[in-house]
Image (tube, helix red, strand yellow):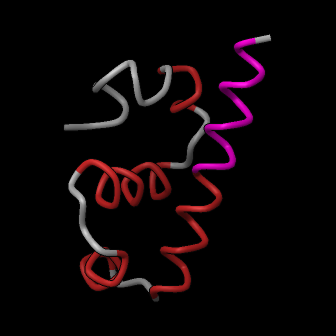
Amino acid sequence: MSLATGRGDLATPRAIAQLEQRTREILEYVYLEDLPQRDVAAMMGLSVVTVSRQVKKGITTLRAAMMAQAS
C-alpha cells in the first residue's frame, strides 16, 4: 500500500504530493507497514533520530496542507 495511491482517509493526494519522497517512504513504513522507527532506520541506512525527525516533518506538512485545503 502507498500513501500516494492509497486510502483517501489518510490524506488527500495534493497534501501527499507536498512530501519529499524520502519522507513519504518513511511514513509509509511507519504507519502503513507498522514498522518500528528503528527498523525503518536500519532498512534505509538512516539514524533513528533522522527517521523520527522525518516522521514529525511529514505529519506537520500533511496537517498543514489538509488544514489549508479544509479552509
Q: In which quarter of the image is residue 3?
A: top left
Residue 67 included in the magenta stretch of the image: yes
Give the residue at x 50% y 20%: 12
**Residue 66 position within the rendered picture, expressed as x and y whole percent measured from the top left:** 66, 25
Residue 51 in the figure: left or right of residue 58 = left
Which residues make up the magenta segment? 59-70
Q: In which quarter of the image is residue 64?
A: top right
Quadrant position of the C terminus in the picture: top right
In the displayed structure, 65 sits above or below 20; it is above
Quadrant position of the N terminus in the picture: top left
**Residue 49 position within the rendered picture, expressed as x and y whole percent measured from the top left:** 55, 85
What is the count of numbered marks?
0
Q: Out of 17 and 61, give the one closest to the viewer.
A: 61
Q: Out of 8 and 45, give the one closest to the viewer.
A: 8
User: Magenta segment, principal secondary structure?
Assistant: helix
Give the residue at x 57% y 43%: 19
Q: Quadrant of residue 40?
A: bottom left
**Residue 18 position within the rendered picture, expressed as x and y whole percent measured from the top left:** 61, 35
In the displayed structure, 44 sits above or below 35; it is below
Residue 34 included in the magenta stretch of the image: no
Give the residue at x 68% y 49%: 60
